[in-house]
Amino acid sequence: MMSKNSQRLIAFMSVLLIWFVISIVLDLPIIPSPLKVFKTLLIIFPSKISIHCLYSLWRILAGLALSIVAGIPIGLAMGYFDGLDKIISPFIYFIYPVPKIALMPIIMLLFGLGEMSKIIMITLIVIFQIIVAARDAVKDIPKETYYSYHSLGASRKDIFKDIVIPASLSGILTSTRVGLGTAISVLFFTETFGTEYGMGYFIMDSWMRINYLEMYSGIIVLSVMGFLLFLAVDKLEEKLCSWR
């Protein structure tokens, strides 16, 4: 049986092969050969792309950090305290389905076109998924688990530390992984406004300059960034949820 790394390598090579064949068959400037794109990427990454990559990575990580710090306590509390869940859930259900990209004009009016608005947009995408995942994970814990732990003299702090948090971690990390894809898409869109740095800006600027080799180079870097973030979440889940 092939390892995960082997499967990923085969998938990557398959995509490159399909891309190479399409570039030869169509023979159009808008679909350059992957060989030319990777050659361009190696040349321009240190001088042009790296700074844009760092800005985008900072925005994603900052948004994720805010989502985790704020979302986990709210979700755990909602799952454990039924009264709190009844109060907060209607607000979550009302706001959660709203397409977050539709809120971007409001966010930019309130927080400007700088870093804060971009980070808040990512936070809005991920935080609700974390809240709902944490709440549902806690509610799935059998009540008998609490009773038996209470009988051993455990405090509420012990219950959260030894039962509630470990039981909900897997769901939280899964929701974070799902939210990452949408967050990166929205980040790309927000980076076309009010900034000169970020992978979204770099890709769109290359497109406007009709520099397709640089445009594809930016797309590859953004894709690799998302892939590495997915892997990081997977590794974190393997480490924190090894009991699974």
Image: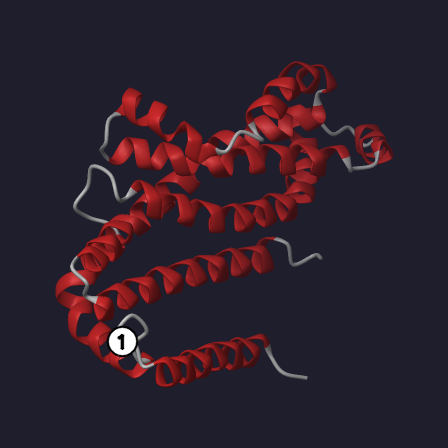
For the point 55% across and 81% down, the residue is 6
Quadrant in which the C terminus is drawn = bottom right
The colouring scheme, among rainbow, by chain, secondary structure or one colour, is secondary structure
Q: How many marks?
A: 1
Apparent side of residue 125 relative to residue 209 in the rendered image (left or right): right
Q: Position of residue 28 (x, y in %)?
A: 30, 76
For the point 20% across and 59% down, the residue is 206
The front one of 194 and 130 is 194
Q: Can residue 68 be seen by looking at this rendering?
A: no
Q: Can residue 59 be seen by looking at this rendering?
A: yes
> Would you place residue 11 above or below residue 166 in this image?
below
Q: Position of residue 164 (x, y in %)?
A: 68, 36
> Would you place residue 210 above or below residue 94 in this image?
below
The front one of 155 and 143 is 143
Q: Position of residue 238 (x, y in %)?
A: 59, 60
Secondary structure under the numbered disc 1 in the rendered image: helix
Q: Position of residue 57 (x, y in %)?
A: 32, 51
Q: Dot 1 surroundings within 10 Å: few (below 14), some, or many (20 or more)?
A: many
Q: Quadrant of residue 183?
A: top left
For the point 69% across and 43% down, the residue is 167
Q: Quadrant of residue 225?
A: bottom left
Amino acid type at mark 1 = Val
> Would you place residue 91 above or below residue 49 in this image?
above
Apparent side of residue 70 relative to residue 86 in the rendered image (left or right): left
Quadrant in which the N terminus is drawn = bottom right
Please give the residue where the numbered disc 1 appears in the rendered image. Answer: 37
For the point 57% across and 48% down, the residue is 173
